[in-house]
Image (tube, rainbow, N blue to C red):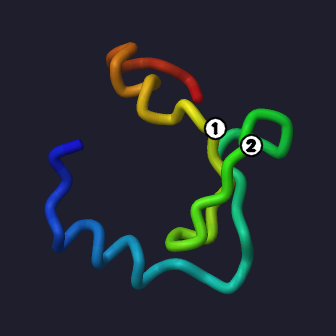
Amino acid sequence: MKLSDDFLRFCKSKIGKSIRYLTGKEGSNSYFKKWQLYAPTNILSFLEQGEGVNV
C-alpha cells in the first residue's frame, strides 16, 4: 500500500481500547487483532478498484 512506517506507527499509537468495524458489522467479517479492527476479508481488493470507492 506504500504507506510509510512512520505513518503506520502513528496510526497504531491512536488505537483505543475499543474494537472498531471498518464497514459495519455486516460487511466486516475478518478481525485484525494488531489493529483491533474488523474489516472485510477482501479489503485489499478495494485498493484495486481505484479512488472514490465507498467502503
The residue closer to the viewer here, 39 or 6, is 39
- Picture coordinates of residue 19, whole percent (x, y): 72, 70
Which residue is painted at 28% across and 77% down in the image? 9
Q: Quadrant of the N terminus?
A: top left
Residues tagged 2 and 1 counted as in contact (Cβ below 8 A): yes
Left or right: residue 12 versus residue 23 is left
Q: Earlier in the sequence, mark 2 or mark 1?
A: 2
Is residue 36 depicted above or below 23 in this figure?
A: below
- Picture coordinates of residue 22, whole percent (x, y): 64, 47
For mark 2, what is the residue? 29
Is residue 7 depicted above or below 28 in this figure?
A: below
Identify which amino acid the numbered label 1 is placed on.
Pro
Which residue is painted at 55% across and 31% down in the image? 42
- Neighbourhood count class around disc 2 (C-alpha, 10 Å): few under 14, some 14–19, many 20 upward: some
Identify the secondary structure beneath mark 1. loop
Identify which amino acid the numbered label 2 is placed on.
Asn
- Picture coordinates of residue 47, whole percent (x, y): 36, 27
Which residue is painted at 17% across and 73% down in the image? 6
Q: Quadrant of the C terminus?
A: top right
What's the distance in space between the residues labelled 2 and 1, CA to CA?
A: 5 Å
Left or right: residue 7 versus residue 42 is left
Residue reaching furthest to the top: 49
